Amino acid sequence: MTAVTLIVANGPGSGHHGDMVSILVRLLDLVVIVFVVRALLSWFPIGFDSPLRPVVDGLHRITEPVLAPIRRVLPPMGGFDLSILIVIIGLSWVVRPVLRGLG
């Protein structure tokens, strides 16, 4: 199983509660994808005149409120920003099992 699973199967007759959990899990997958895309784009120099600049700026506006508090707590790691990794691990290993436990 991959860290990002886009399809969540509900058993027959899971009802409304199971559907809501399924939607939340899919939204969680989308959030993880957003953080992965931000991490990948950070490896490439994207100039101010690049057509990708609006995408990068949008990703920063969406993700920075989550990442900034983690960066304040994490000690410096020699130029490596591990805050995105912490968020992805937290979402995948903590939040996802809790959501699935609700379904």
Image (cartoon, helix red, strand yellow):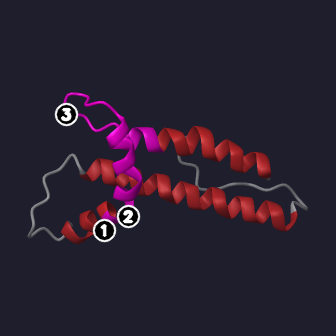
Look at the numbered disc 1 and give the secondary structure of its residue: helix
What residue sits 50% from the left and 38% below the top?
89
Query: Which percent across, then down, holds residue 36?
Result: 39, 49
What residue sits 38% from the left and 64% below the top?
62
Query: Which percent across, then down, holds residue 94?
Result: 61, 40
Q: Amino acid at mark 1?
A: Gly
How many C-alpha atoms fall within 10 Å of the one at disc 1: few (<14), some, or many (≥20)? few
Whether 73 is drawn above or below 12: the answer is above
Q: CA distance from mark 2 to mark 3?
A: 22 Å
Residue at which label 3 appears: 79
How many C-alpha atoms fall within 10 Å of the one at disc 2: few (<14), some, or many (≥20)? some
Q: Which residues are magenta?
A: 61-87
Q: CA distance from mark 2 to mark 1?
A: 6 Å
Residue at which label 2 appears: 62
Tell me where residue 92 sits by quadrant: top right
Q: Amino acid at mark 3?
A: Gly
Residue 21 seen in render: yes
Tell me whether the residue at label 2 lies in contact with that at label 1, contact meaning CB atoms closer than 8 angstroms. Answer: yes
Front position in the image: 98 or 25: 98
Q: Residue furthest right?
A: 13
Q: Amino acid at mark 2?
A: Ile
47 to the left or right of 62: left
Mark 2 or mark 3, which has the lower sequence index? 2
Mark 3 or mark 1, which has the lower sequence index? 1
Residue at which label 1 appears: 58
How many C-alpha atoms fall within 10 Å of the one at disc 3: few (<14), some, or many (≥20)? few
Tell me where residue 6 sits by quadrant: bottom right
Whether 80 is drawn above or below 25: the answer is above
What residue sits 8% from the left and 70% below the top?
49
16 to the left or right of 77: right
Q: Is residue 2 magenta?
A: no
Q: CA distance from mark 3 to mark 1?
A: 23 Å
